[in-house]
Amino acid sequence: MRSASTWLIGGAVAVLLALAVADAIRSRDDASASSSGRQLDGLHGLLLVADDGCRTTAFRLPSTASERPQRPVDCGGRVWSSDGTLVAWCRNGRTKVTSAGGRIDFGSLRGCAPAWRADGALSVVRDGDILIVRRHGDARTFFTRRQLDDALQGIVERPETYTFAEVSWFGLTSFVAIVRGERPWETAAAVFAQGGLESFFPQFGGHLEDLQASPLGNFAFARTVPARKYVMVSRGGDELPLPSIANAHAIAWSPDESRVAIATRNTIFIARSGSTQPANRISTGAAALAWLP
């Protein structure tokens, strides 16, 4: 087994844009048009849908005809490269990387919360620091917990207790992260660019998880207050409209970000970006989603 500092990552890999969603919707039933076995006009692309066991199926839009999936979906803690050839996941405090199907084992690295970067490098969080693992050479520290402490001075109480929990990349040096203090209610999303803090979004009293970047550079995260719902925020700090769906399981944007899909255990709701009312629905649930061209 080779060390994770030298495992082979082939080619440039785009950050996988896939987000998580829903189980009950707070909108009128007549706001959505049923589309089981029916064409969804105006929608295009391939919607990848993973069930609770992470088995993936695909629907070609607008017809919703079943199609063979082009690649797996991020699911069950496994994070896939955009071409579906490599997968990373954390177990027992270490991030492991293998090829699809586990045919090639590239080793493991101490740290969790793996996230692919656009240049094909992988980041992990170790002891509150963000590390970058490249194709060759040793893993290097990219952003430290001490730097996070400095960035949060005057913004939160006891910033030295905060640590990175999840990361999603906008570019080679810009990223959004979920950060947490030592007390349960101390949780926030934060955007970092040019080596410093750009925006900070505290979410007092709620647990945040499933951080995702959108194709146009906005981001979303699941907030569990009181039920798991997605919140979408611009890099500038403005909350953006989303359908209000509780007990969310997965979320994904169309490649041009003109639509957003939100999945519950039983239904996938599709809305125009900027709308709070779904326009279409597919009569199947999902634990994870991705929307490809």
Image (cartoon, rainbow, N blue to C red):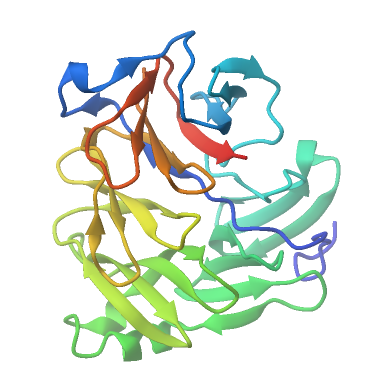
Residue at image location 67% in from the left, 64% down from the top: 109
- Asked whether residue 233 is in view, the answer is yes
Residue at image location 59% in from the left, 82% down from the top: 141
Left or right: 26, with 285 as reference point: left
Residue at image location 37% in from the left, 21% down from the top: 281
Q: Where is residue 251 in the image (x, y as percent from the top left)?
A: 41, 40
Q: Is residue 289 above or below residue 139?
A: above
Q: In this view, does 281 lie above or below 233?
A: above
Q: Where is residue 277 in the image (x, y as percent from the top left)?
A: 23, 33
Left or right: 136, with 91 as reference point: right
Q: Is residue 8 above or below residue 195?
A: above
Query: How many numbered discs, if any?
Result: 0
Residue at image location 44% in from the left, 10% down from the top: 36
Q: Position of residue 89 (x, y in %)?
A: 61, 49
The one of 162 and 92 positioned closer to us in this rendering? 162
Q: Is residue 198 above or below residue 125?
A: below
